[in-house]
Image: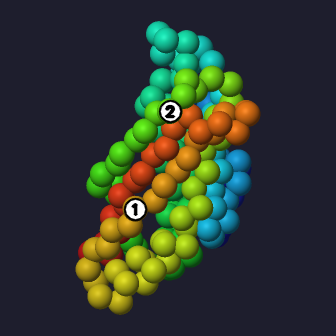
Amino acid sequence: MAVTPSKLNLFSFFKLPSAWWCGVRLKSIDKTTAVVSVKYGWRNQNPFKSMFWAVQGMAAELATGAMMIDQIEASGHRISMLVQNNTANFSKKATGRITFTCTDGHLIKQALDKTIETGEGQTIWMKSVGVNEDGVVVSTFNFEWTVRLKQ
């Protein structure tokens, strides 16, 4: 069963409630690209009148992780996924609607195929870029995902 925005957003209500209450929503997903948006508001603000960095991180991670979930499910294997490392850069105040896009989905299948073939864990770095309504980059996140077969 493919991951769709409505299914994943319902999943987040039950399993990722802090992201859901902050307004993080998956807007679109396919094998190579995922788009997540979140709107600045009182639930996700910091004292400096912009979006709290951790809310941006939740949205950015979901843009990478949604594709990972989708492709693991499509593989038919029991595979665990975990963020091992991440880096972030904040270049402008995040106000208004911020849209995070990840276009690194093509890297996932290679890692999954290799872990299935060898039984060894694999890691991949995926980037998620957040832009405001004017198209200006406000933050960039990089996540190192690890995948391995479950025993």
Name the secondary structure under disc 2: loop
Residue 62, above or below 51: below
Few, some or many residues within 10 Å of mark 2 (<14, 14–19, 20+): few
Horizontal side of residue 132 vs 127, given as left or right: right
At horizontal 55% and vertical 67% (from top left) the residue drawn is 105
Horizontal side of residue 23 vs 54, given as left or right: right
Q: Which residue is mark 2?
A: 91
At horizontal 40% and vertical 62% (from top left) the residue drawn is 125
Residue situated in front as seen by the camera: 119 or 101 = 101
Name the secondary structure under disc 1: strand
Q: Is residue 80 visible?
A: no
Horizontal side of residue 81 vs 4, given as left or right: left
At horizontal 42% and vertical 77% (from top left) the residue drawn is 112
Q: Which residue is mark 1?
A: 125
Residue situated in front as seen by the camera: 76 or 49 = 49
**Amino acid at the residue labelled 1:** Trp
Q: Earlier in the sequence, mark 2 or mark 1?
A: 2
Q: Nearer the viewer, mark 2 or mark 1?
A: 2
Q: Residue furthest right?
A: 134
**Amino acid at the residue labelled 2:** Ser
